[in-house]
Every structure is written in structure tokens, then in C-alpha cells.
Amino acid sequence: MEKGLKRFQARFPEDFKHLKEPPGLWRAVENPIGGEVDLVSQNDKLPHSLFGKINISSQLRHWLTLLPLTQVEVLVVYGLGLGYPYQALKPWLKAFSHRKVIFLEDDMDVLYEFLKREACLELLDDLQAEIRVIPKEDALQELYFKNLAQRFLYHRFFFTGIPSYQREKGGEFQLFKYFFEQSHYFLLVSVGEVLGYAKDFYQNFWGNLHKISESKLFSKLKDAFKGVPAIVVGAGPSLGKQIPLLKKLQDKALIISGGTATNVLNANGISPHLHLALDPFEPSFSRALASTSFETPVIYKLRYNRQAFEVTFGPLIYLNAGFRYSGEKWLEEILGIEHLDIELGSNVVNASCALSGVLGCNPVVTVGVDLAYTEDASYGPGIKPHALTPDQFKSRVPEEEMIYRSDVYGKPVKTLMKWVTESLWYSGFKKTYPDLEFVNATEGGIGFPGIENVSFETVTKPWKKPSFDIRAHLETKLKNASMPVSDGQLEEAMEMLLKSLQSMNETFKVLYDTDKALFLEHNPHSEALEELLKTFQDEPAWKAVVEEFSRTYQDFIETLDESDQETSPAAKNLPGKAQFLWNVVRLQEQLIERNLKIFPEEAFENAPPPKLPKKGELYHGTLEFYWPAGALRRKLDLKEGKRDGKDQFWNRAGQLIMEATYKNDLPVGVASGYTDGGRLHKEVIYDDKGEVLEVKTYNLSGELIPEKKSYHEALGEQADNLGISLESMYRTLQSAAKAMPKKDTQIDKEIKSLSDEIKHLKSLSQKLQTLHKGAAGEIATGDLKEMKQDVDNAVNQMKALSKEIEFQVKDVRKKLRE
């Protein structure tokens, strides 16, 4: 025992700190089959034994067949299993010296028992094997797996667990697997983004920079709503239940939302007091287009999707918190903008909670944060995407697997592992702000561990109106939250950076003419390259932007083994370091040059105020918005808060780039999108019920790009597949019936009936395919409406028939078994 403990302490000192005298929940016994030592639980909450009543060697041999061992270099195993898995893995491990196995253990009793055994010394002396202790604290576990993933960022890995841990501790296994794989994925994405020059981020960053001078500064709103309740709104399915009460609370609490949640509120006649605009991704554009919160103050980061920003209206508040890249930090420092050191989390709901605390709100209550598919829905009721982007409201990608967890009422509900881990963020937030009353009033979903779940009505019942009108108070506070930055200062900072980038570009050009070979080198410690980088140390652009790229490149190369540098696709496709940094410099130079041209126009102050006619509290009539130079920007018709009529958008040059028509909030007719040069690039055709008939996209030459499979075409294919599957069942049943010793006339009749129904299903499937071809162009557009009705009828028949056939199959099977 002493030898094992000392060896473990010497090799893994940080992990040894977690190894305390265990409570003795396991007892060593002899496995009844095979005679190996096993552990039997003395606690009802633990599995009966570590390996069960199965031969341990046989069990592990089968386990090995389930692992993709030939495809991985690093195997991460949840569960030490008294060292038996190590012995089973040794042939694989020793076949190549670069292979590694990492055993993760969270049961100190098991680890303690292992270290008692003489056999532990072999594993502890093997530099290809490691034993690591998973911390017990929830708040530390995600960081632990992030650090572990960082170590093996560029290695092929597989995360698994010993059979008993996968079986008996499945929840922990799935969570740890998710932590590791997601950390690995996001780290790779993050590094990949930098190695891809962070183009999307900096396009948004420099493209949105001119907004700062017209913005307010968020930090100046600190404690502006001290003691006022805050309601942080998510877009979850349960939000629909809270809409009536939310409407009554608009004068009692500060309502904060972002992303899709704002669209749900808008669809139900509510505008939040504050809207967060943080997401850099393309769906933000559709959400911004669909929003009707035209006067709601917008808290934003410069990374916010540039297209979405162009169609976002309302007073702007620059959020001086949370850095993604060094360019942000440099900008705030050179402009003298105070920076708030707060943790914003990973999405707008997290950030809304954090910012509520800065505003002095107490309590902070969340609603609509289901983190689950409550009643099989993704979002709250009523949201409608913009006519030109009908497919942008999605809560998951196809690769994400749905899992089941208990909801706040103890009932099973579908969720995603990313939501399970997000729920832990709220628990950490509560610990960070112990004096803040933080309540989850989401009536559904999986809840937040350690956070009280109270009905929305119960938690809000004692609330009274503050001594001021919330919207008027916010407007007053914003007047005193001026940004200490002018257009001239922004322009001056960009011109200084541009001049520095141009100087670096010239240096690279001269060097390229004299030493082209240097630009092919990946070695980050090349003497010639080191000398070059020394000349850049005092350049503003180096400190502001380029140094971060240099450091990430170097870390990437140094993390790779020599063999990886030759074989890794990422390394093989990566230019030499000098070439990479030159590319960074040229891209930044182009982006700043392009966006400096916007500043003269933004300096205009002759734009008329937006026209926002209302009927009561709802927008009613033709709304108009203008560019700073005075040109019309957007024009849309609303009737009592709902779209009814035209919705048009023009670029700064006065070119129409988008138009759609609505009737009672539903898109009808043709929605069209155009390039800045006026070329048609997209058409979405709707029927009079607001359903998509057809989507057409065009290339720069005006040629129609073949569309992806339509919904009905996909249904047709599903019908084909279902028909094949059912036909296979039919043949199996037919063979079984023939093999029966006694002939059953009734079964023969039912099998014949089943055959006829399957033929009918096939004919419907064929009809679907034919109708789709007609809708794709063989039939005139004017007939599409009638054609769609035929398709819908065929689909409904197919669905009903499929269910009927399934019942028939089950019935025939039952009779055959009898």
C-alpha cells in the first residue's frame, strides 16, 4: 500500500491531493467466475459489484471489440477498474510508443483499493498510462475537462468508460464525455478560427466600429435599477404560459431578452426594456429582421453579426465587458473606455443574468429557460421568421443527439447535453453572487441544479411598482451614459492601425523578394523569422492584432508531434508562419481600409427621425427608417403590431436589397432578395396561408441554383423507405405463414390485405415524387397552390396508411406467435 501511495504521489501530486481516507464503501472479494479480485458494494446507492457475475477477462475482451483502437492515439477511460482495463489494453498501448491511455476516476474508494495492490506499480511506472482524479465539485469539472482536452487537442482520441461505469453511472459518464468532447471541439474551433484569420469576427468588428460614437456606455448604467426585480426571458416552450403575467409586470420589473426570446415577446405584443445583441452568427440576421422592438435599447458587442446590425433599431448601448480577441482589448485601452470584469457566459441568457446584477437588479428571475423540448416544442409560441429567411429558427444541429432528463416536476423530457451543461452555469452564477436572490420561475424544463424553482405567479406576487416609470427611468439614465468617444477618435485610431499594417506589409514584401524559402517554414523558432518579428515589436498593429495570431500559430505547431506536422491535415494545409502572419496583416489592412470609407457618411446628422406611427401601444401604419446621410433605409407596413403590407429594405446607395409582402402577419406572394449591385439572388414563394411553396436561389450570373430537397420530396423518399421496410416485414410474415403446420385462412387473408396496402403506399410515394417535379418547374406557378393541396392530401393519406399498416403487421405477428 505504501509503495503505491508514494508512487502515485510522486507522479501525480495534484491528483494525490484529492486522495483522502475513503469511507470503505467497497469490499474486495473473489469474482465467482474466473477467480480475479473484484469489489462488492456495501452501499445500496452503488452497483452491487464492480464487474458483476461475469468473468472479468472475458468482459473486457468484449469491451475492447467495441473500441475503435486502430483509429485513435489517445484513449480516455472513465473508471480505473482495479487496473484490469490497463492489462487488457497493454497490447494496443505498446504497439506504438506515441499511444496513451488516461484513466479517470471519481471514486476514491476504488482508487485506494487499487493502490493497495502490487499490480498498481506497473501502471504507475508506465509513462504511456496515467491515472487522473475527477474533482467532486460541479463548478470545477468543466474546467478540468477543458484542460484535459487542451493537452490532446491535435491527437485522435476516443472517450469511453469501463462497462460497469457506463451501465451504473451512465449520467456521470455521459456528462464527462460531453465535457471532454465539447471542450475539445470548441478549442479546435477556436484555434481553427484563429488559423482561419478570424475573418468573420473582424469583418463584424471593424464593420460595426462606427456605431460606438453614437452609443451609450453600459458601465455607466451600474446600479441604475438597484432593488428593482429583473425578469430574464429565454425562448423556451414554457414561455407561452407566462405571457399574460409578463404583460402585467412591464411596469414592475425590468424585462431583458435577446435573440429568439425577443421574437417570441414581439409575437405576443411585448417589447422588452432591454435587448441583447451578441451573436455573430447568420441566424441573428433573420431574428433581427423579424423583430418589432424598434425603440428598445440594444446592448451590443462589436462581434454582433454585421448584417443583423444593419436592420437593428433602437438606442445603442456598447457593452464594455468580455473580450474575444486582442483587437477588442486594444481598442478599449486606446480609446480610454473602462472595462467591466464580469463573466458573460456563453449565450444571451447567461449574459442577461450577469448584466442584471451589474444594473443592481434584485431579485433576478428567469422564465422560458427550459433547456429542454417541453411538450416536444423548441420555442415559445407565435414566432415567425422573416419571409426571406423561413428556415432560420433552429435550436439544434442534426449531429446533436437528444437525451432524456427529469424536468422540474420529475417527468421525463427531451433535452440536449449542451443544455444539461448550461444548467450548471446558472448554479455557478448563483455562487458568484451569493447576495443576489436568483430564482428560476420557468414552469417546465430541466431546471438549474441547486437553484430554487418557484412558480412565476408565486415569486412575482409581492412585487410592487417602483417609484418611477421603468422605460422613462431607463431613458433618463441613458442620457447620462454618454460614450467618451467621437467619430474623429475612432477614425484616428483606425488610421493609426492602418498605417502600422501598411508598414508591416511593406516589410513582408521586401523580405519575400529576398527570402521566399522563409515563407514556407513552419518552424516557429527560425532565427530569420525571430529577427523579423523583433522588428515588429513596437508596431501598434503587432500589439493590437498580429501578436495574438503569432502566439496561436506557435502554440499549434508546438503542440503537434513531429509526425503530426507531416501528416496532420491542418498542419499540411497551413502556410509557413511568415506567410500566415503576412496574410493576417493584409486581411486586417483590407478590412480597415474598406470600413474607413463608412465614417464620412456616418458623420452626417441630417437623417430625419424614424417614423413610428402607433395605435395605442401597438405600431400601426407605415414605419420608415433612414440612413445617417438621410436616404430611406427600411419601410414596412404594420396593422396593430402585425405585418400587413410591404416590407422593404435599401442599402446606403439607395439600392433595394429586400422586399416582401404580408397579410395579417403571414408572408404571401414572392419575397425577393438582391445583391448590393441589384442582382436578384433569392426568391421565396408563399401561398395565401403563409406556407412556402418554393425557394429559388441564383448565382452572380443570374442562373438558377438547383435547390435542396423539398419537404415533400423528402417525405416521398421516406415513403419509399417505409415501403421497402414494410415489404420486407411482409415477406418475413409470408414465409412464417407458409411454415406453419396448420393453414390459417384468416392469416392468409390479412397478409394478402397487407400486400395490397403496401402497393397503395408505393403509389402514393410515386405521386409525391411526381407532384414535387411539377412544383419544381414542370407546372406553371399559377397552378402551384392547387398542386400543393394535392401534395398535402397525399402526405396525409400516406401518414394514415403507414400507421394502419404498422397495426396490421403487429396484429399478424401476434397471430403467428400464437
Image (cartoon, rainbow, N blue to C red):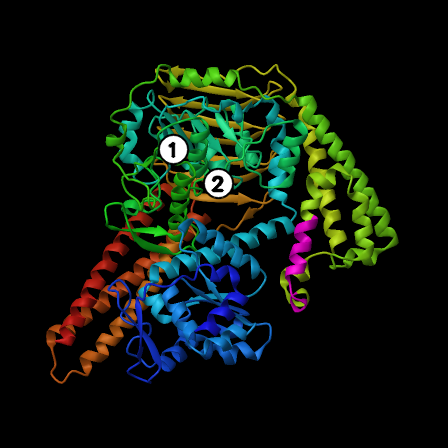
State the residue in front, 136 or 506. Answer: 136
Q: Is residue 541 left or right of residue 57?
A: right
Position of the C terminus by quadrant: bottom left
Secondary structure type for disc 1? loop
Magenta span: chief secondary structure: helix
Disc 1 designates what residue?
435
| Residue drawn at (57%, 72%) of the image | 127
Q: Is residue 620 visible?
A: no
Check if residue 88 falls in the magenta segment: no
Expressed as whole percent of the image width and height from the top left, the position of residue 540 reads 74, 36
Span of residues in magenta: 550-564
| Residue drawn at (76%, 52%) of the image | 578
Expressed as whole percent of the image width and height from the top left, the position of residue 225 reads 42, 22
Label 1 crowd (10 A; few <14 / some 14-19 / many >=20):
few
Q: Is residue 218 visible?
A: yes
Disc 2 designates what residue?
283
Label 2 crowd (10 A; few <14 / some 14-19 / many >=20):
some
State the residue in front, 742 or 102. Answer: 102
State the residue in front, 546 or 281. Answer: 546
Of tags 1 and 2, which is closer to the observer? 1
